[in-house]
Amino acid sequence: MTATDASRTMTEGCQGRILAGNFSPGLQARVRELVQRFRAFDEAGSPTIPYVAAWHAHGETIWYEFVGRRLALLLGWEDVAAAERFRASVVERRVFRAPVAGLGVREEILPSGELDRQRSGLRDEVRRDGALEAVYKVAAATGEPVWLKDQARVEYHEPDDLFLSMGCLTPVSHEMALEDELKSAQEALRVSERKFREQAVRDNLTGLFNTRYLYRALQELIAGSRRDDVPFSLIFMDMDNFKAVVDAHGHLNASRALQEVAGTIRETLAPPAFGVAYGGDEFVAVLPGVAKRTALALAERLRAAVAEARYLTGRGLCVRVQASLGVSTFPEDAEDLTDMLALADQAMFRVKKQGKNSVAAVNPGAG
């Protein structure tokens, strides 16, 4: 069978169910008129594919009374039980909703499985609106997907409890390919922007937050603490004798050791607490909503975790390090972020002078 023969068979074979069936004269006259007009439109060489479809109000089956010959040619079908075959070949359905409440056009995407589950509801929507506009991705026999925009008007024939759908399928594969390329480019841009924003507040070596993020977060925490009367604390941590690690294993391995120390900090702190690479071998832990007594306990837990860890084992080494930690709490110890950091730093240096590898607070008896 040639393609021309196939298309002729399709257009001639898809019509007649209503005309040959037990339907009201009014419906049959309407279908006869529509088929005549749509066939003339199709034979005039329209780039769109006209169709007349029908379905019972309480049935699941939909059929074409007429469908343009280009459908078979476009999808590579040799014959058509057109409506059922088209329905089975749909991969995806997209509907573009009009803007609502200041929002832009909304795109709703239904894959074939979800489309089957929601078909009854979608049909009710068509009945209510009296019109249909959607875009379908159809799996063609050639293996290449074809996008078809479906626009139709629906009318109900009460004596037969039947709906007629009069519409056109317009090939829009090129436009949809461009649309998908644009969406991919926009998503790539969003990912790039998120990555850039993340990099802007992260330390390149350790992956912890950097001081830029720290100062901004402290300003927000101070404002929130004043508003809600909730304290927060800082831990200032400095590695003890870290130059010995550099001298023994080199700068590169020392940097790797700091990366692993940052991992210990992440593992020890539970959100919303977070760690900051303050510079060199110094770190800050920020503890939102934590009073001094709890902050001291967390600092001791962090000190012990660092002291007990074995670093650079993946490189055949076994490096052990220790740290001195100082704690300050807002608002009892300081009025601003500069004092918060300075006082925690001073507490840490007091530990250094007293023997290192320990924890101290600005005012140990408070909290």
Image (cartoon, helix red, strand yellow):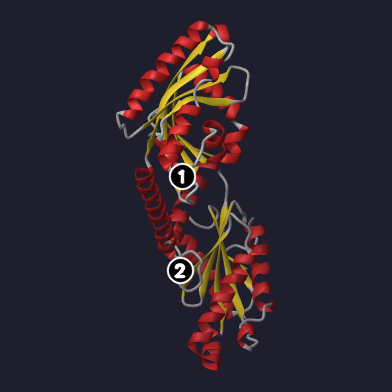
Image location (x, y in percent) of residue 183: 39, 48
Q: Earlier in the sequence, mark 2 or mark 1?
A: 1
Given the current orientation, which residue lies at the most extreme bottom position? 248
Q: Residue at x 66, y 78 (%)?
A: 307
Given the current orientation, which residue lies at the most extreme front position? 1
Q: Residue at x 54, y 7 (%)?
A: 24
Task: Give the quarter of the figure containing the C terminus.
Answer: bottom right
Q: Residue at x 48, y 64 (%)?
A: 209
Image location (x, y in percent) of residue 350: 56, 74
103 sits left or right of 92 in the view: left
Q: Which mark is residue 224?
A: none
283 sits left or right of 360 in the view: left
Q: How many marks?
A: 2
- Rounded to the nearest whole Å, what is the CA distance between mark 2 and mark 1? 57 Å
Q: Residue at x 36, y 19 (%)?
A: 37
The answer to whether one can see residue 320 in this image is no
Circles 2 and 1, Cβ within 8 Å, touching? The answer is no
Q: Identify residue type, mark 2.
A: Asp
Image location (x, y in percent) of residue 238: 54, 75
Question: 10 Å neighbourhood of mark 1: few (<14), some, or many (≥20)?
Answer: some
Q: Identify residue type, mark 1.
A: Gly
- Vertical placement of 26 versus 212: above or below? above
| Secondary structure of residue under mark 2 | loop
Of residue 106 and residue 364, the one placed in the foreground of this image is 106
- Vertical placement of 13 versus 317: above or below? above
| Secondary structure of residue under mark 1 | loop
Please tell me in which quadrant of the rendered image residue 286 appears. bottom right
Residue position marked by numbered label 2 in the rendering: 203
Of residue 72 and residue 308, the one placed in the foreground of this image is 72
- Vertical placement of 63 versus 157: above or below? below
Residue position marked by numbered label 1 in the rendering: 76
